């Protein structure tokens, strides 16, 4: 019965958060995407620094967590290089010129899918751990994860569109990534003790992916628009993204 609850909650949580994000994102005009990338930056940084990193520090040694985040940023740098080389093998290729490219040739999209998959996997483990304590705690935990995931999934969806993905492909990638919640939940049920030692490392990888995509891939694109109005708009939307994550955390905290 516990396993059935874990499977149901993992599937429902993943599909509900992706569905809500897609419903919002499908109503967004293509011309709005560059502007709303600022909101995506805010949600990524907000989720990383307000949610993921504090949990990583709480679940293990802070130095170990910090080292994992640092190593993760380096690994994502190498991964991005490999994605660039896949598109082009010469230094003067358009893929190396951020000022000429209309989008980033899928680089930030690839990184965000990897990071989001790991994140969903960890969410599945957390759901399993909660349901193994009690059904009520499991349901509350699953609802909390959905509430946290919706603004982040909106940001992820926008990043995929910004990376050149079609809306259908972005939805498909998010749905596939959400299945990692189910995998984490089932594996967590059968081997929760084995995964407890890896929680800090997994959370560190998640935080690294969020920070790297926001700072290395998305923020440089904002500097192409130097006007005061554009700068104020970008800053406001980044702040709104961070505030959205903070508000959801506050509401979940009060509900507990």
Image (tube, helix red, strand yellow):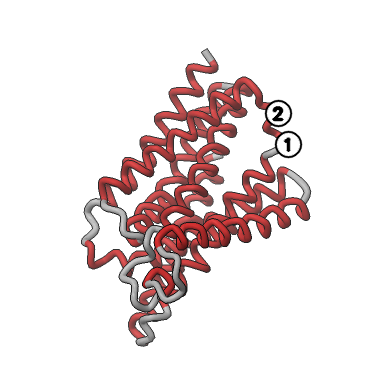
The residue tagged with tag 1: helix, strand or loop? Answer: loop
Q: Nearer the viewer, residue 81 or 228?
A: 81
The image quarter in which residue 87 lies:
bottom left
Q: Nearer the viewer, residue 127 or 170?
A: 170
Residue 254 at x, y percent in the picture: 54, 45
User: Rounded to the nearest whole Å, what is the CA distance between mark 1 and mark 2?
Assistant: 6 Å
Quadrant occupied by the C terminus: top right
The reply to whether callout 1 and callout 2 are in contact (CB within 8 Å) is: yes
2 vs 74: above or below: above
Outermost residue toward the front in this view: 90
Q: Residue at x 45, y 48 (%)?
A: 113
Left/right placement of residue 137 relative to residue 172 reads: right
Residue 115 at x, y percent in the picture: 52, 49
Residue 124 at x, y percent in the picture: 53, 33
Q: Residue at x 53, y 51 (%)?
A: 250
The image quarter in which residue 195 lies:
top right
Left/right placement of residue 98 relative to residue 33 reads: right
The residue tagged with tag 2: helix, strand or loop? Answer: helix
Left/right placement of residue 19 relative to residue 27 reads: right
Q: Residues within 10 Å of mark 2 (few under 14, many from 20)?
A: few
183 vs 241: above or below: above
The image quarter in which residue 12 lies:
top left
Residue 33 at x, y percent in the picture: 29, 64
41 vs 149: above or below: below
Q: Residues within 10 Å of mark 1 (few under 14, many from 20)?
A: few
Q: Which residue is mark 2?
A: 194
149 vs 210: above or below: above
Q: Which residue is mark 1?
A: 197
């Amino acid at each position: 019965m516990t396993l059935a609850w874990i499977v149901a909650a993992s599937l429902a949580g993943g599909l509900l958060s992706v569905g809500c994000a897609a419903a919002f994102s499908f109503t967004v005009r293509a011309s709005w995407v560059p502007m709303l990338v600022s909101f995506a930056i805010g949600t990524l940084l907000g989720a990383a620094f307000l949610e993921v990193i504090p949990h990583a520090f709480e679940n293990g040694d802070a130095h170990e967590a910090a080292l994992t985040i640092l190593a993760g940023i380096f690994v994502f740098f190498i991964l991005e290089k490999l994605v660039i080389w896949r598109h082009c093998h010469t230094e003067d290729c358009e893929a190396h010129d951020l000022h000429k490219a209309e989008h980033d040739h899928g680089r930030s999209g690839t990184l965000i899918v990897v990071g989001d998959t790991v994140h969903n996997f960890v969410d599945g483990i957390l759901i399993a751990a909660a349901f193994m304590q009690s059904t009520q705690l499991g349901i509350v935990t699953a609802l909390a994860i959905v509430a946290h995931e919706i603004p982040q999934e909106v940001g992820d969806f926008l990043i995929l569109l910004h990376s050149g993905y079609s809306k259908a492909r972005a939805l498909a990638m998010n749905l596939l990534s959400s299945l990692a919640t189910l995998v984490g939940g089932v594996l967590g049920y059968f081997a929760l003790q084995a995964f407890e030692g890896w929680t800090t490392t997994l959370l560190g990888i998640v935080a690294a992916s969020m920070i790297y995509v926001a700072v290395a891939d998305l923020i440089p694109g904002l500097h192409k628009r130097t006007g005061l109005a554009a700068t104020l708009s970008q800053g406001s939307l980044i702040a709104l993204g961070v505030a959205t994550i903070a508000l959801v955390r506050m509401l979940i905290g009060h509900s507990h």
